[in-house]
Amino acid sequence: PGAQLPFDPEKKTIVVLGSGWGATSLLKTLDTTDYNVVVVSPKNYFLFTPLLPSVAVGTLSPRSILQPTRYLTRHKTRQVSVIEAEAKEVDPVKKTVTFSDNSEIKGQVSSTTIGYDYLVYAVGAETQTFGIPGVKEHSCFMKELSDAERMQRQFMDCVETAAFPGQTQEEIDRLLHMVVVGGGPTGIELSGELHDFLEDDLKNWYPELAGKIRITLVEALPSVLPMFSKQLIDYTESTFKKSKIEILTKTMVKEVKEQSVMLQMPDKNIVEVPCGMVIWAAGNVGRQITRDLMAKLPTTQTNRRGITVDDHLRMAGSNDSIFAIGDCTASSYAPTAQVASQQGNYLARQFAQFAKKDAIEARLATLKTAPQTEETKNEAASLMKQLEKLKLRPFHYSHQGSLAYIGSDKAIADLPIFNGNFASGGVATYLFWRSAYLSTLFSLRNRTLVATDWLKCKLFGRDVSRE
Ligand code: FAD
Ligand code: NAD
């Protein structure tokens, strides 16, 4: 495959697995002058996950929060290979990755293996189901773009089915009961967005149904949003109360059926609750490929939560050739976009240092074999000094704060300011939330698309047509 890649045998090869927060942030900063760079991901785009719940209710159009990976890599000094494929196996001993084209259309070659000098492992995680019966079959996840699109279709199907002539009251109540599982930020934001949709749009388009829609948020722990400060948790709970979103804490989903959920209530009784749709936002679990890779390094990779890395993000046991970042790792950091993007950025700077170090060492090796003159001795001494100065600093995470949208044009924010914490919630925080996400979007194109969608939504409401 080397012949088809922008391959220079003199340069080291970095293979990047993934095109999410970690990988994209790495690619943004990476100086490709000194490396052959190959990106392998089953999605040929970056997905801006913080705005995914807005897609699920039609506030934003799906394409507005995607950025094709090639839009980023085409500006690089040397050509970067972007391959739409799913990595199937990593061999940390032979230093190879095997990947396959999993899309509908396949050519004569649809699977291949390539070698790497450095592997950036940034494949993220998948949705945790804890093996609870019926979750995979009967609920909607909120991780990929397809999940948000599926949720929108299914939600509108529930509404249209409830509007079918002659539907019994009991059936209408069931169809219009939305159960969100998980009181983490994903579940909270999604419940808030759903509420907005009901309040702003369904009242107009389905006035006969609007008052009948119920949202229930189920959380196993004693409170929602454990990562936020107490006052913001209280604020969210009171906002939800006003918005008529019922929060059930200390309640665990035990099974998801086609038309109901089985809940274990705080008193341990099991109750069957009829519903039209279940949205499952119960956290992350490692991917199969990650578990397979860890199994190849059984003495060092023993953490069930994910890949163990050192403070330079090197995968333990990989002989400094695999770097793991983002949600696939088990570290003291939360699995957030903030962490993954800072890690990607850090790694890009590390690779620049490695390239400098390699160049100095190569020059020193040449000087060693050259005739020893005053000039070569001086150059070698100066290079040695430069080498000593090249410090490889450990990764340091700088927390910029936590933000979440809670519906009704309100958001909450915990911001680290002056060595303390500034907690705020309300409409002003919502405007801050909007501007923060708008500026975090990677390109002007996406910023324009999202801003235009917000404006369209304000002017014309959300689209209730069902594809
Ligand atoms: P991802 O961004 O998930 O990227 C993984 C990449 O790997 C993807 O491109 C995927 O296609 C690719 N991949 C998968 N399998 C393979 C394979 N076998 N081979 C090659 N590539 C593969 N965090 C925040 O900080 N703030 C927020 O507001 C926020 N909001 C969120 C909202 C939602 C709805 C969700 C789901 C998450 C949110 N997060 C937020 C968390 C954040 O999205 C993750 O922490 C972040 O995406 C992790 O980055 P990553 O690069 O590790 O993984
Ligand atoms: P999470 O892990 O934060 O929350 C999942 C919740 O589901 C947990 O509180 C858990 O107790 C609950 N749960 C699990 N199984 C359950 C069951 N059977 N019944 C009832 N409740 C159950 O997951 P998330 O919200 O998807 O977030 C994942 C990561 O992404 C986190 O690190 C989060 O901080 C980040 N994120 C951040 C934002 C933001 O900053 N605005 C938004 C979304 C996600």
Image (cartoon, rainbow, N blue to C red):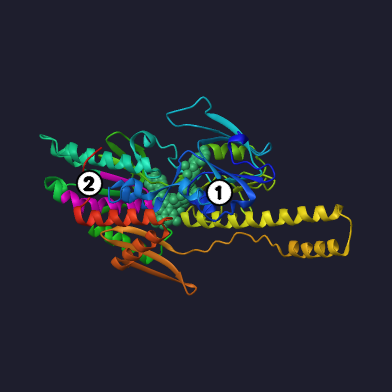
Q: Is mark 1 within 8 Å of ligand 1?
A: yes
Secondary structure of the residue carrying numbered label 2:
loop
Q: Residue furthest top?
A: 108
Secondary structure of the residue carrying numbered label 1:
loop
Q: Residue at x 49, y 32 (%)?
A: 101
Residue type beneath disc 2: Asp
- The reply, left or right, for residue 60 in relation to residue 212 is right
- The reply, left or right, for residue 436 in relation to residue 314 is left
Q: Residue furthest bottom?
A: 418
- The reply, left or right, for residue 1 in relation to residue 438 is right
Using the rendered view, name the quadrant where residue 17 is placed.
top right
- Tell me, for residue 463, which label it has, or none: 2
Q: Residue at x 50, y 50 (%)?
A: 24
Question: Residue 355: x percent and y percent?
Answer: 67, 54
Residue type beneath disc 1: Thr
Which quarter of the rendered picture does the N terminus lie within?
top right
- Mark earlier in primary sequence (2, 1): 1
Question: Residue 236: x percent and y percent?
Answer: 32, 60
The magenta region covers 178-203
- Tell me, for residue 329, which label it has, or none: 1
